[in-house]
Image (spheres, helix red, strand yellow):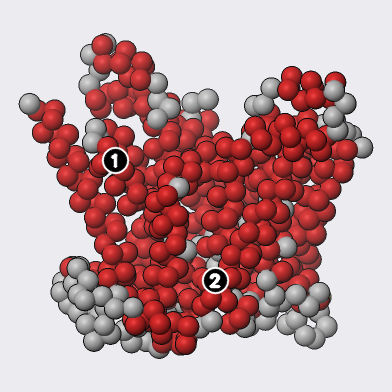
Amino acid sequence: MGAPVKGRLLDLVLVLAGLVMIAPLVWLIVTALSEPINAFQLPPQWIPRPPTLQNFQQVPDLIPFARMAWNSVQIAVITTAGALLTSALAAYAFNRLRFPGRDQIFSVLLAALVVPVQLTVVPIFIMMRWLHLVDTTVAIWLPALVNVFGIFFLRQYISSIPRELDEAAIMDGAGHFWILFRVILPLSRPGLTALGIFVFEASWNNFFWPYIFLSSPEKMTLPVGLVSLQGAVGGGPAVALFAAITLVVLPILVLFLIFQRSFIASIATTGLRA
Amino acid sequence: MPGYLFISPAVLLFLVFVALPLLAAFGLSLFHWDLLSTPEFAGLDNFKQLVQDSATIRAVLNTFVFALASVVTHVGIGMLLALGVHRTMTRGTKYFVRTAFFFPFLVSWAAVALLWKYVLDPTFGIAAYYLSSSTNWLASPTWALPTLIVVDWWHTIGYTFIILLAGLQTVPAQLLEAARVDGANAWWRFWSVTLPVMSPTIFFATVITFIGAFQIFDPMVIMTQGGPDGATRSIVQYTYEKGFQAFEVGYAAALSLVLFVVIMIVTGLQFRLSRRWVHQ
């Protein structure tokens, strides 16, 4: 009898902790759906009173929300596709090809994993200013096209694929591009997916870099746009800001609930293998 | 030489956006420059100024406190949570708790920081209401930093938790069963089987949390602007203020080098200490 009761107590504690954890998010969404006069009442209302979408309609008047969302999508897609491509090419070479200096070059890349981006941001800002790329989306995705962690991660992944497979293709006269794209990458799909989610998510949520490089509202990404909206609504209770935050959070929540397994796997595998 | 061809995109980008800026940061730290006038060679002036600047010392201290508290709360509570979720038999509970704790990690810091500013607001925030407090935590020199530690915990615990949970799943059931047959109680099984098997994962989580915490910037800049009176200013935030608001580019470069050195020393130390407790 003792064990099941103890088990149920554990469940109860865990569920209560989970409820406390999501309370701020529930409060966010309920408030965003409330009439401005009913919002921010205490005690907080946890069930939406007649919900309204009027706060959401206000968002585009305050910031170019659609434009910012498009910038975020564009930057995240280019960064993810580019970083996966450059990482896959390099990872293949570092694992399967022989060339002078290979291991030394790889070691130098690996050592750079400990360099914080904050150390490079001032020089890159000066470089971008010189190239007239400050306040453009290019300044955000261009430096992100090289992902040292991605090279390392994919190299580990590719090294677990049996060499007999590509050796057979070489016998048949296949070139390295063909082997990489037709043999290795299809077999690396779980690794590519995990890395892709990881990179996309990091780009989508990135605040530091866009905050420094982007200043015009129509160039901004969503995270920076949200923070600029805070200034637009002033210090008081800001229902429109809650609507905007909800618009940012909701798509991720939906995507997460659909692809939960891949999201969690991407964190678990990219984390554990590093 | 297909090898060079394949690595060239990554290596070229690396040279331009990592190696060159890294060298440039060292160079810049030896100059006084406001981005407009001609750079003026300053030798070690910036570093001299740095050790005398009470704001730098404060920022370094704040960052250490924040990083230490992060590691203890993320890894400690994350481990308890992972053990709990791992043990529960109910699928619904497992799914709900895993989702509830992991999801905040996927929300951008900008959204989290703005939302929590309202959660913590002394007049209409839910935290103030449920804790029956009228303290303006973010405006209090004593409470501002601990408050940001809590908000960071809420945002980032999901990452540590998932990594620890994945690590727990690698603990061989036969090993635990063998210990049970030998009469080991739950605590002893945890201590003699789970913890040793988990030690590389815990080590990884500790190192990653430290490195991430030393680079903290977003919640400070959005929620407190480093205030009140520098109580929450972090190294990176101070670098930002110096470089992009005061336009003291050389000083900012010197500060970012301090961050780099701190991360190197602490990470190196962790690897050294890890030989004592991490099982390979």
Q: Which mark is residue B94?
A: 1
At horizontal 56% and vertical 75% (from top left) the residue drawn is A68
Task: Please state which amino acid type lies under the numbered disc 2.
Answer: Ala
Q: Position of residue B72 (x, y in %)?
A: 38, 48
At horizontal 41% and vertical 57% (from top left) the residue drawn is A254
Nearer-the-camera pick, B74 or A98: A98
Q: Position of residue A28 (x, y in %)?
A: 32, 70
Chain letter of the residue beneath label 2 in the structure image: A
At horizontal 87% and vertical 42% (from top left) the residue drawn is B4
SS type, badge 1: helix
Mark 1 crowd level (few <14, some 14–19, many ≥20, 10 Å Cα): some
- Taking the image as shown, residue A111 lies to the left or right of residue A40, namely right
| Residue underneath mark 2 | A69
SS type, badge 2: helix
Mark 2 crowd level (few <14, some 14–19, many ≥20, 10 Å Cα): some
Q: B160 above or below B151? A: above
Residue A65, can we see it?
A: yes
Nearer-the-camera pick, A166 or B61: A166
